[in-house]
Structure formats: structure tokens, C-alpha cells
Image (tube, rainbow, N blue to C red):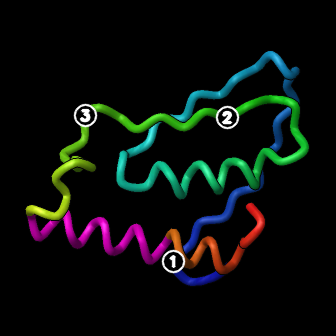
């Protein structure tokens, strides 16, 4: 395990009709989709990731505030790191 990461093993025994809905903050839902797709690879169940509506992060106006720019930059760095570490996911 690397510093600053949380690793969990997911064990799912579900039929193909089962769909898991995961609600996440909008600023990191794309990265979570990649992580969940890797974790559920080979499982018949599906995982759908939805951004919550109750977040202060707004994808349409993130560049207008310092906090929005900071959040976007940090998430972009994390997404790029994930893409480098797992290029085929």
C-alpha cells in the first residue's frame, strides 16, 4: 500500500441483474468510475457511479473560484496518476 491510498478488496457474489448505484462527489466521480470498473472486472454485476446534487462543486463554473481551480487541479493530478498506473482500465 502506498502513502495516501486506501485499498480494499471487493468480494461480490451477485447475479447479472444486480446493479450497484454509487453516489460520489462530482469532482472525483470520473476517477471512481475507473476504480470501480477495475474492481468489478469479471463480475457479472454492474456498478453505476452518479455525482451527488448536493455538492458545492460546479463543473460549469469551477474555474471562477480559487477553491474550484484547486479542486480541479488536484483531481486532474489524481486522474492522470491513475491513468499512468492503470493505462488499460
Looking at the rendered structure, the secondary structure element under dot 1 is loop
- Mark positioned earlier in the residue sequence (2 or 3): 2
Say which of marks 1 and 2 sits in front: 2
> Residue 14 location in percent, x, y?
85, 25
Which residue is identified by label 2? 47
Q: Report the quarter where the C terminus lies.
A: bottom right
Nearest to the observer: residue 52 or residue 12: 52
Which residue is identified by label 3? 54
- Mark positioned earlier in the residue sequence (1 or 2): 1
Find the residue positioned furthest to the top. Answer: 17
> Residue 13 location in percent, x, y?
87, 30
- Badge 1, how many Cα within 10 Å: few under 14, some, many 20+? few
Relative vertical location of residue 19 with respect to residue 47 in this rendering, above or below:
above
Say which of marks 1 and 3 sits in front: 3
> Residue 10 location in percent, x, y?
77, 47
What residue span does the magenta drawing correspond to? 65-78
Nearest to the observer: residue 60 or residue 12: 60
Which residue is identified by label 1? 4
Q: Is residue 51 magenta?
A: no
Q: CA distance from mark 1 to mark 2?
A: 25 Å
Amino acid at each position: 500500500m502506498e502513502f495516501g491510498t486506501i485499498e480494499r478488496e471487493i468480494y461480490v457474489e451477485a447475479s447479472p441483474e444486480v446493479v450497484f448505484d454509487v453516489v460520489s462527489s462530482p469532482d472525483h466521480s470520473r476517477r471512481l468510475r475507473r476504480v470501480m470498473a477495475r474492481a468489478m472486472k469479471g463480475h457479472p454485476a454492474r456498478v453505476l457511479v452518479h455525482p451527488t446534487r448536493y455538492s458545492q462543486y460546479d463543473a460549469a463554473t469551477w474555474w471562477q473560484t480559487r477553491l474550484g481551480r484547486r479542486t480541479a487541479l488536484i483531481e486532474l493530478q489524481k486522474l492522470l496518476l491513475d491513468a499512468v498506473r492503470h493505462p488499460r482500465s
